[in-house]
Amino acid sequence: MSSPLLFAIAALIWGSTFFAITLQLGEVAPAVSVVYRFGLASATLFAWCLVRGDKLRLPWRAQRWVMLQGFFTFALSYLCTYGSEQYLVSGLVAVLFALMVFWTPICSRIAFGTPISWRTWAAGLIAIVGVTMLFYNSIAGAWKEIAGGGSGHFLLGLILALVATIASSAGTVVVAKVREQSSNLMLTMAWSMFWGTAMVAAWALASGQPFVLPAAPRYWMALLYLSLFGSVIAFHAYFTLINRIGSAKAVYIGVVTPVISVLLSIQLEHYRPGPVEWLGMAVCLASVAWALRAPAVPASSSASTQPAPAASLAAIPEVP
């Protein structure tokens, strides 16, 4: 499958998952919903590996990196994401995930010493300007509420969402180390989601959150969509993309995602963006196009995030 198609699949799916998460809030505690989501996704991946005839065992050295990825990507990040959507609108949380274009190069720099180019900073700044314009009215309304002496729930949601974006960026950087230990992406995803599920389940039990089974059909429909599409399919596309073009470029999926969220809102929630919002969408897409046309960092200087040189997404050869 071609890299542009993988990019589009992940962006389109994740553009809708922020809204789908809201369908799971209420009757079930956020942490428990995370357990249900990634427990089902992990079981699906393990089953698929068995169908393919794969051995499910991973050596301990690989398991250590897989556990770390599970902690950042599927435990801490989603625990904070589900928690933040109790206080913030899903679109605003999606906007904050665009900050990954900054956090990911910084995490890569800290972990592996990968240099950060001026183009990365410039494109990231343009992207943040775009998403800010895109949700300008929502952001302005939230700050007005705080200034008027409103509750601190918005601030708590903001902090949780920011922690989620940093955790996701850290997990994105760990993908390269997991790849070094095992080339079986399905299997490492299965184990990573398993460990993430176990960690969140332990937290839910320790904090006394009940494991209930809701009766609402919309909850189960959202669970199936988030588990199979938002977790199995989208993450497989995303991790494959990271292994091809590196995390610094693949992370721009997080910039396109808010745009997709708005387009879906226009169709499903009767949202009508104004001129500023439309301009913000254009700026977002322009920043992505500019960033993805940047020359790749040579593998010798950034082996952990750039497995293969490439001039652009379109230049990556297809995999059967």
Image: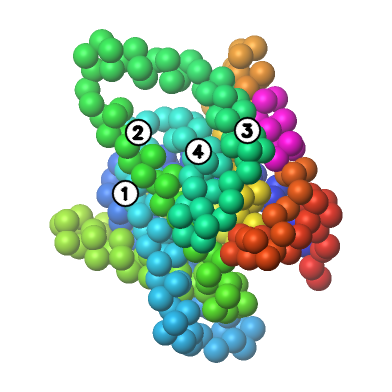
> Where, by quadrant of the figure, is residue 120 drawn?
top right
Q: In front here: 136 or 245?
A: 245
Residue span colored magenta: 282-291
- Taking the spot 66% from the left edge, 19% from the top edge, the residue there is 278
| Amino acid, disc 2 | Leu
Q: In this view, does 300 lie to the left or right of 105?
A: right
| Residue 218 sits above or below residue 197 on the image | above
Q: Name the residue under label 2.
A: 158
**1 and 3 marks in contact (CB < 8 Å):** no
Give the side of residue 245 with respect to residue 311, left or right: left
> Image quadrant for the N terminus?
bottom right
Marked residue nearer the N-terminal end (2 or 1): 1
Pointer 1 or 4: first along the chain: 1
SS at circle 4? helix
How crowded pointer 2 is (Cα within 10 Å; few <14, some 14-19, many 20+) is rated as many
The Cα atoms of the two marked residues, 1 and 3, are separated by 36 Å
* Quarter occupied by residue 199: bottom left
- The residue wearing badge 4 is 99
Q: Which of marks 3 and 2 is in front?
A: 3
Mark identifier at residue 122: 3
**Which of the two labelled residues, at mark 3 and mark 2, occupies the earlier sequence position?**
3
Q: How far apart are marks 4 and 2 (CA)?
A: 13 Å
Say whether disc 4 or disc 3 marks the residue closer to the N-terminus: 4
Task: Tell me the quadrant of the picture where the C terminus can be found.
Answer: bottom right
Which amino acid, mark 1? Pro
Q: Give me the disc on residue 30.
A: 1
Cα distance, mark 2 to mark 1?
16 Å
Q: Give above or below for 121 relative to 142.
A: below
The mark that comes first in sequence, 1 or 3, is: 1
**Which three-letter amino acid code belongs to the residue tagged 3?**
Ala
Residue at the image position 21 percent from the left and 57 percent from the top: 210
Q: How busy is the neighbourhood of tag 4: few (under 14 within 10 Å), some, or many (20 plus)?
A: many
